[in-house]
Amino acid sequence: MAYPNALSAYRETRVRTASQGQLIIMLYDEAVKQLDHSIELLNLNQRGKPDPSRIEPINKALVKAQEIITELMVSLDFEQGGDIAKNLFSLYTWFNRELLEANLAKDVERIKAVRTMMNELRGAWQEVVAKTAAEHRGNPSSGINIAG
């Protein structure tokens, strides 16, 4: 079946041709998706405990979200980002700590709190990327900053 290969090729091309800002948004999108998945799986039964068959998928989704957050952490440029980069680093560190604790306790409220903040940050990045793209369209002589 060629469909899975075509989809994989499309995704790879999309990532390879994305701008740095678009890549950050893609990371946020995937983190939010994984957090949503873990929340969905963490539906509690009547005894207040998660279904034992869902423990491993919940763990995988939360670990994947943590890996994405860690990737966002290592991509920060402290020289150019200044206080914003430092604040994001602190926030990402908190996110990972909260998700670790939430995973251990299967605490859906902690996951929801991180998810809400991740989604808000994603929206802020979306605005920055859109504004930057509009500025580049308005000034075609401005080059691309390849310094990162």
Image (cartoon, rainbow, N blue to C red):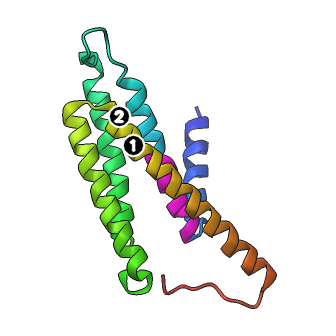
Q: Residues within 10 Å of mark 2 (few under 14, many from 20)?
A: few
Q: Amino acid at mark 2?
A: Glu
> Which quarter of the figure is the N terminus placed in?
top right
Please give left or right for residue 112 compared with residue 29 in the image: left
Q: Position of residue 33 (x, y in %)?
A: 48, 40
Magenta segment: 20-31
In three-dimensional space, the C-alpha distance between marks 1 and 2, rounded to whole angstroms, equals 6 Å
Q: Residues within 10 Å of mark 1 (few under 14, many from 20)?
A: few
Q: Which residue is mark 1?
A: 113
- Asked if disc 1 and disc 2 are in contact, CB closer than 8 Å, the reply is yes
Q: Position of residue 23 (x, y in %)?
A: 53, 62
Residue with the most extreme bottom position: 141
Q: Position of residue 106 (x, y in %)?
A: 25, 30
Front residue (pair 114, 25): 114
Q: Is residue 23 above or below residue 138?
A: above
Q: Is residue 113 above or below residue 84?
A: above
Q: Amino acid at mark 1?
A: Ala
Q: Which residue is mark 2?
A: 109
